[in-house]
Image (cartoon, rainbow, N blue to C red):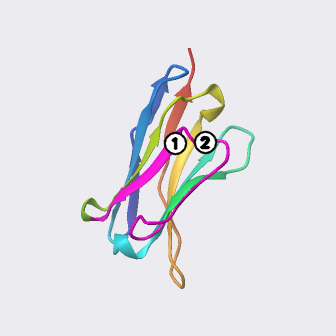
Amino acid sequence: QVQLVESGGGLVQPGGSLRLSCEGSGLTFSDYIIGWYRQAPDKERELVASIGRIGGSTNLADSVKGRFTISRDNAKNTVYLQMNSLKPEDTAEYYCKAWAVGRRIYWGQGTQVTVSS
């Protein structure tokens, strides 16, 4: 059974940092592109960052460039999202997604990030 499990969310003050983790099991992790998405209340889910299968290719949404970094450790089946200089508008449920050509898409259950003073 394939699972993606996010962790690392929480409550942080504006300007603070969090590191989210997405750990996969039941799949050949290195075969999949991994993306971090977020969804705030009453808003559509949006792609925040993605990383290629071996980590050489990354993409970041304009709203998080210069503040967020995505990385992966395939030996640990884990992708990380380092979030610095957090803003209240970063508040959302954060999800990771795994996809590969010709294969099923997988989602994690989400982790809540709240940025508030």
In-image side of 14 versus 77 (left or right): right
> Quick one: quadrant of the N terminus?
bottom left
> For the residue carrying disc 2, how many other residues have a C-alpha within 10 Å: few (<14), some (14-19), or many (20+)?
some
Q: Amino acid at mark 1?
A: Phe
* In magenta segment, residue 58: yes
Secondary element at tag 1? strand
CB atoms at circles 2 and 1 under 8 Å apart?
Answer: yes
Front-most of residues 56 and 4: 56
Task: Report how many numbered discs are placed on residues in the image.
Answer: 2
Q: Amino acid at mark 2?
A: Val
Q: Residue at x 50, y 47 (%)?
A: 110
Q: Position of residue 22 (x, y in %)?
A: 40, 53
113 relative to 43, above or below: above
Front-most of residues 41 and 85: 85
Q: Tell me the residue that label 1 is attached to.
A: 68
Q: Which mark is residue 87?
A: none
Q: Position of residue 63 (x, y in %)?
A: 67, 42
Instruction: Specify start and end residues of the magenta stretch as a single range.
Output: 52-74
> Quick one: quadrant of the C terminus?
top right
Q: Position of residue 28 (x, y in %)?
A: 34, 75
Q: Which mark is residue 64?
A: 2
